[in-house]
Amino acid sequence: MMDFKRALDKEQTTCINGIFVVLVFLSHFGQYERMPWNKPILAIGQLMVAPFLFFSGYGIMEQIKKKGDEYIDHMPRKRIFKFYIHFCMALCIYLLLSFLLDKDYSLSRIIWSFTALSSIGNSNWYVFAILAMYIIVYISFKYFKKNGIASCAIMTFFYIILMKAFKGQDWWYNIILCFPAGMILSKYKDKVCSIICKPIFFVCMFILALVLYIFHLHIFAYEVIAISLCFLIVDVCAYKEIKHSVFHCLGKYVFEIYILQRISMNLFDRYLDGWIYLLVCVILTLIFAYTFRELETKIDMLI
């Protein structure tokens, strides 16, 4: 018996995010140090970030269903502005780190880093993508209420076109459709769940991805694969509960771990290697994440 209510409750999705944030951490660590898991994780690629976008879209749509216009009206301050302030707080730490490590970044690069379109050692594309999707959601449900999800999907396609033109690198846009896919799951939960629980759904998605690939629409083929993975995760969790206290705890600190993990990696890259280097990075990142969350909470009270 598949239980989709359990699969999509906050406890379960938080655990899934915790599992994938570990994969992201190991992936980024592999950019600094050669480890046994580098090749397998490299093969996963951008797909390890897809659940974050998918469950973010799902969660936002759940809030819109519950609170309606009130949620949308407060979104610029309570969601978009707060998230951006948290990002800027982390960026200031990286700016200080760049001075400590004698990194010579140009003034223009530093300024652009505050838009998340550039970087001064931090991870940035995901931050830009989330901010863009929040803004898209706000515009869609503020000005196109009856067609909010359709507007989100259309504007997300335009986002792909713009990012392909201005940034070029696939990772800026090749899983972004997971966000509106999560919103669709929330909006039409019963219908979508009745479809994704059938094996034929994944067969059709595989064929669609193959056709898109044959016609050289590689980005959209990858989007289909990423969305399929997210729906597969939901199916697996509906079939069997996947919960663990450690992953649940990590899942509550996804942003903090994601944005702060490179601090310790950059700090000790010159001095440590191997498993000691990894252990130090893990411990410090967890300490940074917890401390940063406490600071975020205090700052949020002022906003």
Image: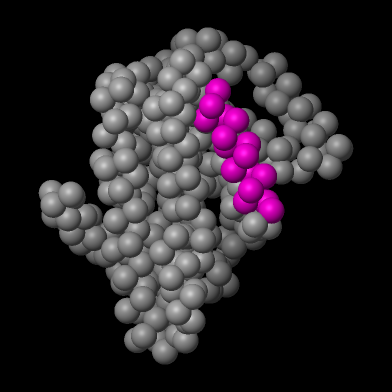
Front-most of residues 30 and 143: 143
User: What x and y, as percent, mark residue 190?
Assistant: 47, 10
Q: Give the main secondary structure, helix, strand or loop, of the magenta stretch.
A: helix
Q: Is residue 282 above or below residue 102?
A: above
Front-most of residues 212 and 161: 161
The colour scheme used to paint the residues is: one colour
- Residue drawn at point x = 76 percent, y = 43 percent: 218
* Whether residue 78 is visible: yes
- Residue drawn at point x = 13 percent, y = 49 percent: 301
User: Viewed as shown, does residue 299 lie left or right of 285?
Assistant: left
- Residue drawn at point x = 33 percent, y = 29 percent: 72
* Whether residue 40 is visible: no
User: What x and y, as percent, mark residue 205?
Assistant: 70, 26
Front-most of residues 228 and 275: 228
Front-most of residues 189 and 241: 189
User: Viewed as shown, does residue 48 lie left or right of 110?
Assistant: right
Q: Is residue 269 above or below residue 182?
A: below
- Residue drawn at point x = 44 percent, y = 33 percent: 139
Queried whether the magenta region covers residue 209, the answer comes back as no
| The furthest residue to the bottom | 102
User: What x and y, as percent, mark residue 295?
Assistant: 18, 59
User: What x and y, as percent, mark residue 237?
Assistant: 45, 26
User: Viewed as shown, does residue 235 lie left or right of 289?
Assistant: right
Q: Which residues are magenta?
A: 150-165
Q: Is residue 233 above or below residue 165?
A: above
Where on the picture, by quarter, is residue 208?
top right
Q: How many marks?
A: 0
| The furthest residue to the front | 143
Q: Is residue 253 above or below residue 245?
A: below
